Image (cartoon, helix red, strand yellow):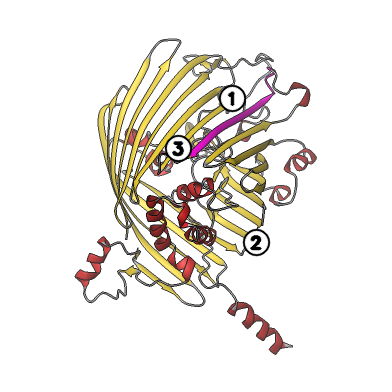
Amino acid sequence: MRQRLAFLLLLFFAALPVAAQEENVPVANPVYDFLKRMELKGVIEHYYDAVLPISRREVAEFLTTTEKKQDMLTEVDRGRLRDLLSEFQYDITGTTENFHRLIQTEEPDFGSSWGAELSQREKYLYFYHDSTLSFFVNGLLEFNGRTIQGDALGKTKAEFLQAGGRMRGTILGHLGYYAQWTNAQFWGSRELLERDPLISQSHTLTVGDAQNFDFADSYVRYGNSVVSAQVGRERVLWGVGYNQKMTLSANPRTFDFFRVDAKYKAIKYTFLHAWLLGPVGTLNFKVPADTAATFQEDTASDKYFVAHRIDFSFPGVIDLGLQEMLIYSNRSPDLAYLNPLTIVESSQRSRGERDNAFWELDMQLHFIPRIELIGSIVYDDIHVPQLFTSVWYDRYAWQTGMMYVDMFGLENTNLMVEYTRVEPFMYAHPRSRADSYTSLDRLLGPTVGPNGDEWFFRVDYLPSRNLTLSFRVSFDRKGENIVGADGQVIKNVGSDPLVPHSSTDPERKKWLDGILVRNRHPEFLATWEVVNQMWLEAHLLFDSEENTVTGVRNENTTAIIGLRMEL
């Protein structure tokens, strides 16, 4: 019996796909933009992009399919495909031929090894692979300088130098691992860096005597062709929108989570349980050694996010997604919500209806060649008799949009249009401030927030395989609460997810009530990959905020230039 078992195990491990890489591709990787174009062109099918990231194995499969249909691509698309086939070569073929590494290099001397860093080869500090595991290490380096001129900060500037590393790989073809850490030393205006939506998420930036900011992601992930499970921390984007993600956007700080996915042909299921942080508060206390003095301590309690999603894909016609989400707090992780097969709405009712539950339906329509139409609606506590009425507890958010590739026959272009609207009092919880749809006071979903809407337009032009030009503009409106000089809310119009409806507030909501603020954000981005894994980036941003009550307008212009490298 022992011999038979050993023989079966040997057969199992011998049959494992050695090249299959189960670690994920970070959401910022441009391969996702490329795959989206391929989906709209009808080159690939069953591309589930409502929840990102996906694994390198899945990306490799899509790229392999695309390689077989190159006749459907433009010349620029074919050039980008060649670059991506090189980047994912090991995931597709299991070989590292023509890869370059600094440690244990095959170059004849030190000078030649460093010279190869300016080549078009795939570059690593070190890599190793055999029939058991793969191991890839990159060094990360970024130089960034920016300046702002306008009403917010006057005229000032900031620079930073960021360095770090990334380690990833897969063991026995199924267990992926990933770790990335970066730390940046900055000079100049801290306030200017705090205006950056991603850099401002670093806790270190808020420490007054520190001149740096850092980030760290890491996880392990088991996966095969049907089921995967992951635990750790990385950026997750959840939603079908192009700018505003309805479920999970890039607005909150990266969080830790447990995730399970199951996919078979036209159906995919996703479960996520995440650890968030509650509203920032202050605790006043005294100590026995000095009862005359009062001390203060900043606090942020633990809270949790749960989501279940099921996708149905009908290529060339429609992709449907149905999901439920829930926020809970003020206790340890709840076993009822760690169950990936439960219905959280029913579970939370059976446990006292203490938590904040949501339902969401979204769709992506693909029946028009090269065009995608999207729509989604999120509901907070469904009350059927009051659907789409003005009662305050009829809370929902919705979004619609369109993407058009190679628009009007212009090759190598993308057009995106999106409209997002969030009703008053959405995302707040009447019984618990901690159960708002936020983490560290930042919304998990659309940044426009409740009692606001946004139009977003984006045009991309891809003149060559290594150059991307993008123009984007957003127009948003928001009705703000009226707040007194002492910080107390005088009139609650439902604009703040941390200020729920109270018994003294009107029973009827009014869209865009309160202090109406209008914002415009035109921006231009250019990314040039000078050589493989070396990017020169430029970003010009204009923002304008107008208070329609006072007539005061604040305008600012920000210019950013950066150089990123992966060694």
Q: Can I make out residue 152 in this image?
A: no
Q: SS for tag 2?
A: loop
The residue drawn where x is 67% and y is 82% is 8
In the rendering, which numbered label is found on residue 159?
none
Q: Is residue 209 or residue 492 the one in the foreground? A: 492
Q: Which residue is mark 1?
A: 499
Please tell me whether mark 3 or mark 1 is closer to you in this view: 3
Sequence-earlier tag: 3 or 1: 3
Amino acid type, callout 3: Met
Q: Which residue is mark 3?
A: 407
Q: SS for tag 3?
A: helix
Amino acid type, callout 1: Val
Residue neighbourhood size for the residue with mark 1, other residues' Cα within 10 Å, grouped as few (<14), some (14–19), many (≥20): many
Q: SS for tag 1?
A: loop
Residue neighbourhood size for the residue with mark 2, other residues' Cα within 10 Å, grouped as few (<14), some (14–19), many (≥20): few
Q: Is residue 477 or residue 429 the one in the foreground? A: 477
